[in-house]
Image (spheres, rainbow, N blue to C red):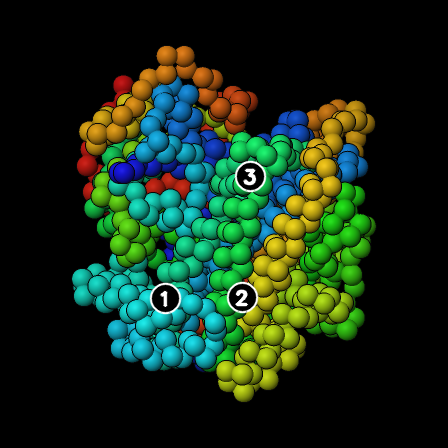
Amino acid sequence: MAKRITIDPITRIEGHLRIDVEVENNAVSNAWASCTMWRGIEKILRGRDPRDAWLFTQRFCGVCTTVHAMASVRAVEDALKLEVPLNAQYIRNLILIAHALHDHIVHFYHLSALDWVDVMQIPKADPAAASKLAETLSPWTRNSRNELKAAQDRVNAVAASGQLGIFTNGYWGHPAMRLSPEVNLLAFSHYVQALEYQRKALQVVGILGSKTPHIQNLTVGGVANAIDLDSQSALGMAQLEMIRELLSQVVRFVQQVYFVDVCAVAAMYPEWFKIGSGVRNYLAVPDLPLDSHGSAYDLPGGYIRNGDIAGAKSFQTASDPVFRQSVSEDVIHAYYQGEKPLHPWVGETEPEFTGWNADGKYSWVKGPRFNGEPMQVGPLAQVLVGYAQGHALTRKYANLAIEKVAAISKIQVTPDMLHSTLGRHAARAIRACMLAELAEKHWQLLVDNISKGDYTVHNQPVLPTHEVQGVGTHEAPRGTLSHWVVIEDEKIKNYQAVVPSTWNASPRDQAGAHGPYEASLLHTPLARPEEPLEVLRTVHSFDPCMACACHAFDPSGRKIGVVKVL
Amino acid sequence: MKTALIAGIGNVLLGDDGVGPYVIRLLESQYSFRENVEIVDLGTPALDLTHQIAGRHALIFVDSVASGDPPGTIVLFQKADMLREMPAQRVDPHSPALSECLLTAEMLGAGPEHVLLVGVVGECYEPGRELSAAVRRSVEPAMATILQELDRLGFEVEKRPFPVEPSIWWDTQRSDPKCSCPSGT
């Protein structure tokens, strides 16, 4: 008899991911992924000036504001067939890279590492032994005995206080936790350091974007950064040098700490290369354009069906005709009106809430499909698509990861093993290393172009009165993001955002096919079904980000005062 | 130098959830602050909030709250009240809420001494709506509460002799006056 477990822990904030699994013989036998909040934000864009859309779209989400701004200006530029000057492309690319590095660091350390790292083992660790072990893994200079001892003291202080504070509700002592106290300590020390380095990445976004969260420097047709090498108030050498210094620190952290930690976790939990595969269709779009009209990119795109890496297809541009034609959204199991899957340009967002129903509608997430099939998006798709095409930078870091895991544990990782929970973590670390290298490249491209005397940052958009359609894509930290816009009479007629987490968290479709989260959970073994750590490990490996939220603080604590407003 | 952060939190596209950013924009337009006070519309931050919090002497948040009081009521919370909220399992990056970021800052030894959350009870969180009338009426008192707290903590604030136009670009008063929140929020 199957037993159903619901993981819906976020009762204090509206609108989050809920996972329901059925468990039989200590393994997952069925799964449902759902989102608990309505996303009808697109509707408010209708009738507005398309040049303003990005200001609104970057408020969809508090975590990935930048990506929604970027996809929006790209959608309008695509509709207007507007080129973007080189400086603007490089500035945008630097912002996107810095944002992605910040996001990947935060995802691994602060949102998923504690699925693998048992903080409550840290008091037993020997900091000197941990430091010695670290020396064999990485040249990182902040793995000294003293630094590790300080991290251990923080945990000891929390444990001694009798209140676990930030560590309340972890699955400590769970039988699926297997790292030695020293490895747990190393990882936790990096958890603390990661807070510092993700901030440096965000500072780069802030310098170029004028503000973070919510960058202010975009315009349809380019950016609004004035370039003047000698000025303190415009984008000049002083700012560029500051950006270079910040990036170089983040790059070192990614390559010497994050990448190494992921390889170490992979080496110590190798069975997770066999768990969590699910949907083996992958989708990624090209990104980081290298010219003004989008014919060359630093990151490749394409798609793979049924895990057939050799048969991968590639996209030539970020709005490739095949991509434009092949996307639809299915609402048969989502709380929206409508029967047939619709292309985003004619997409509708009319709610029809029925309550959670395992056989009917059960999620506020629509089901995006590519040629009618569910697709997995995210770093694993990005890396597999690049690997399949022989993309040099992808292969470089994929091969480094394989070597590193083998050096730690003698385990030979093959590309086929990447269809897994650990594969998604490994791919994210590989992608982060690629982006780190490209950060330095695009900084240099920008400086070289400015040095040639090119200060152009913007092309003026001209809005036609007849109807035009556009799609703007960005290969965001969580995967393929696309904004679809229809413009008529200089106003937005329709707008739809197909976001990465809707691809991955999508519910079943007309054909009954599971979405990627759901499919990845099937057959997952659970050591203790009442503490479903293994389910969280797989769901977290996708880096879920739901709902783009409504953050009402819902207090159970004591009010200190109530002010009556008359 | 002791520093303070005044942060507006909430989604400006979701009706009354935008009250935090709204209050911030009005404060910015009517008052000038010294270098040691940062005032910012943070939108709906997640863990990013931790680094905004860490190392500050005082924090003042303004956010919409669901306390069960009538819409427009202002409810105040202090640090101890917020730390009482224990973190749940993090499922996605939105999960770390105010309390969790405070706990992280505490664990790092960089927790603020003073925290005040100025909460405004919302009425409607429907996309595309402007603030409800009840919440709009509480904007001035919320501003006054923030200024009072700054004064109590010894941070100087000056009223601008010539207020600038507040940048509340999202509040365009286009919505249907009737609320029909489909998600029941």
Q: Secondary structure at mark 1?
A: helix
Q: Quadrant of the C terminus of chain A?
A: top left
Q: Chain of mark 3?
A: A
Camera-side residue of A201 and A562: A201
Question: Is A456 on the left or on the right of A195, as rendered?
Answer: right
Q: Is residue A344 visible?
A: no
Kindly identify which chain the residue marked by label 1 belongs to: A
Residue that appears at 41% across and 42% down:
A551
Mark found first going from the N terminus, 1 or 2: 1
Q: Nearer the viewer, residue A246 or B152?
A: A246
Q: CA distance from mark 1 to mark 3?
A: 31 Å
- Classify residue A552 as left or right of residue A408: left
What chain does mark 2 sit on?
A
Marks 1 and 2, how far apart in space?
16 Å
Mark positioned earlier in the residue sequence (1 or 3): 1
Disc 3 designates what residue?
A: A209
Residue A416 seen in render: yes
Rendered image: mark on residue A320: none
> Residue A255 bears which disc, if any?
2
Mark 3 burial class by Cα count in 10 Å: few <14, some 14-19, many 20+: many
Residue at the spot 54% in from the left edge and 31% down from the top edge:
A233
Q: What's the amino acid at mark 1?
A: Ser
Whether marks 1 and 3 lie on the same chain:
yes
Q: Residue at x 64, y 57 (%)?
A: A438
Quickly name the residue at label 1.
A189
Precedes in sequence: disc 3 or disc 2? 3
Mark 2 neighbour class, 10 Å CA radius: few under 14, some 14 to 19, many 20 or more: many
